[in-house]
Image: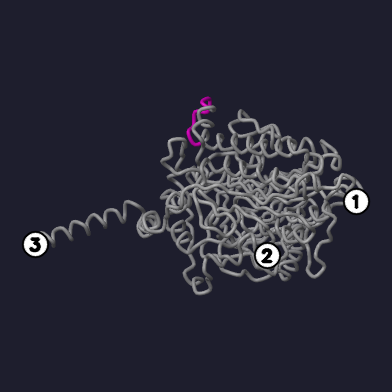
Amino acid sequence: MIKRVVWAIAALLVLAAVAFYAVGGRAGVMLLTTRYWVHKDYAPPRAVTWQAGPPASTVATDAPRRPPNIVLIVADDLGFNDITRYGGGIAGGKVPTPHIDSIAAQGVDFRNGYAGNATCAPSRAAMMTGRYATRFGFEFTPTPKQFMKAVTGMAPADQLVKPVYHPEREADLIPYEDMGLPTSEITLAKLLQGAGYHTVHLGKWHLGDSPQFRPYNHGFDESLSHLHGASMYLPAKDPNVVNSMQDFDPIDKFLWAAEPWAVRFKDGEPFQPPKYMTDYLTDEAVKVVAANRNRPFFMYLAYNAPHTPLQATREDYDALSFIPDHTMRVYAAMIRSLDRNIGRVLQSLKDQGLDDNTLVIFTSDNGGAHYVGIEGLNSPYRGWKATFFEGGIHVPFFMRWQGTIAAGATATAPVSHFDIFATAAAAAGQKTPADRLIDGVNLLPFIKGDAPGRPHDLLFWRTDTYLTVRAGDWKLQVSEAPKKDWLFNLAVDPTEKVNLASREPERVAALKAQLLAWNQTQHQPMWPSLGAGPIAIDHSMKQPTTTRDEYVYYPN
């Protein structure tokens, strides 16, 4: 009997050892642990009841025109070339995006619209506050230690330049849930709430998961929020979903193991949505518009599409049978769904008679990601999410306010996500806070031609030791890993093909001095980045790396 037990234990140890290496060593075991011990099943779907505004009968007919509603729609990791506005589009333009494109056609298209950062959470922090996120220490996207260990420990075998992990920084780490937007910051929701707006958030938050950092503590009256940074779109085995798992991507492996299928309404217990996430968020957004038709409201609709994990409804997938590549077809189906659902939100404004008195803003938090494995998501620009090349930070950026912003307007001067704050405040008739520096400016006078010059002569970006400045039409990127400078004249080289750093040393020195002066005004990060990954500038993660690749290490 004892021998049998010993042999059984030995067999289990052998199997465990085999599994250890088969699933990716320690990082693989961590994924298994995440999948079977951390992943949760949440409560079944339940109905959400939104607070109703006053009935029409109580609104005075002779009252002055009320302030405009403000609807901010943010996509997640949308590539510049995912939409058909600029003559391209996903799958060679075969999947049109007429509803997203219409926001630009009926309003203003900021042709040089920039993300606040090259990754999601700092970019959203800039939108919400009107400030560089580095100005108050929100430099890195909140990520748990387990995530950083897993994704830096599972580099593809053919990746010549490997990710790095910084165990020495663990001592300065704070709990993941407390990696949040400081409550001392004044968000756009808080500003508008003080002006009598009803404020609603739906979808991605990623600005702190502890109760003190959740949307309702940042000025939102109501919130239907993802947990942590995002959510699955449907359970992986749902009969109505088609999945594309990216075996080459450590991030994707972690998401499939750990991503929740749940939302939280206000501060209640998390529960499962009843349908595909993009459809569900839109259903609820349409209800929010109807509930608030008789009072000014601010709705921040933060879709997680088309961020990985790649999941499409079977209906959208089947509609794109002309796309042969499975991953491309799933991703394109997600874009199709996103555009259709944004169209539903726009239609709801029209149905409620609010079309002419609503400022609609559309953008993406950053560029398309290399780990999706699809080439050209940010064409014609080089680079990806998690780089300061144009592909990482040059994003679709549209505003529509019918009767106030002329249809078909085009603005070519550089603008930033943090301009949303001051622009929305001005539309609502509110002054921006005077007790702190607001980096954003009101874009409305520039759109109308009432203000001369550019909204910004200088724009900056920072993540750890990787810094970038755009000064006029010149752009300098400074990287410590690898130690390299990239200088581009965007007036003649908007796609950053010709690095002029070696030819223009004096200009590089002058721009570095401007970077240094700005950097000294920024705050130390509130938590460290535990890892950094190499991002090939000119191809996706799916393609093997070569010694000729240009790359940059992006922390976090």
Q: Which residue is mark 1?
A: 451
Give the crowd class for mark 1: few <14, some 14-19, many >=20 residues within 10 Å: few
Q: What percent of the width, then of the height, locates residue 282?
A: 62, 42
| Element class at badge 3 | helix
Q: What percent of the width, then of the height, locates residue 227?
A: 53, 56
Q: Which residues are magenta?
A: 321-327
Instruction: Measure the alpha-carbon separation of dots 2 and 3.
Output: 62 Å
Q: Earlier in the sequence, mark 2 or mark 3?
A: 3
Q: Nearer the viewer, mark 2 or mark 3?
A: 3
Q: Earlier in the sequence, mark 1 or mark 2?
A: 2
Furthest-bottom residue in this view: 171
| Element class at badge 1 | loop
Q: What percent of the width, then of the height, locates residue 4?
A: 10, 59
Query: Please, is residue 375 above or below residue 268 in the view?
Result: above
Query: Please, is residue 196 above or below residue 494 in the view?
Result: below
Tally the marks.
Answer: 3
**Front residue (pair 474, 53):** 53
Q: What percent of the width, then of the height, locates residue 144?
A: 49, 62
Residue 75 visible at all: yes
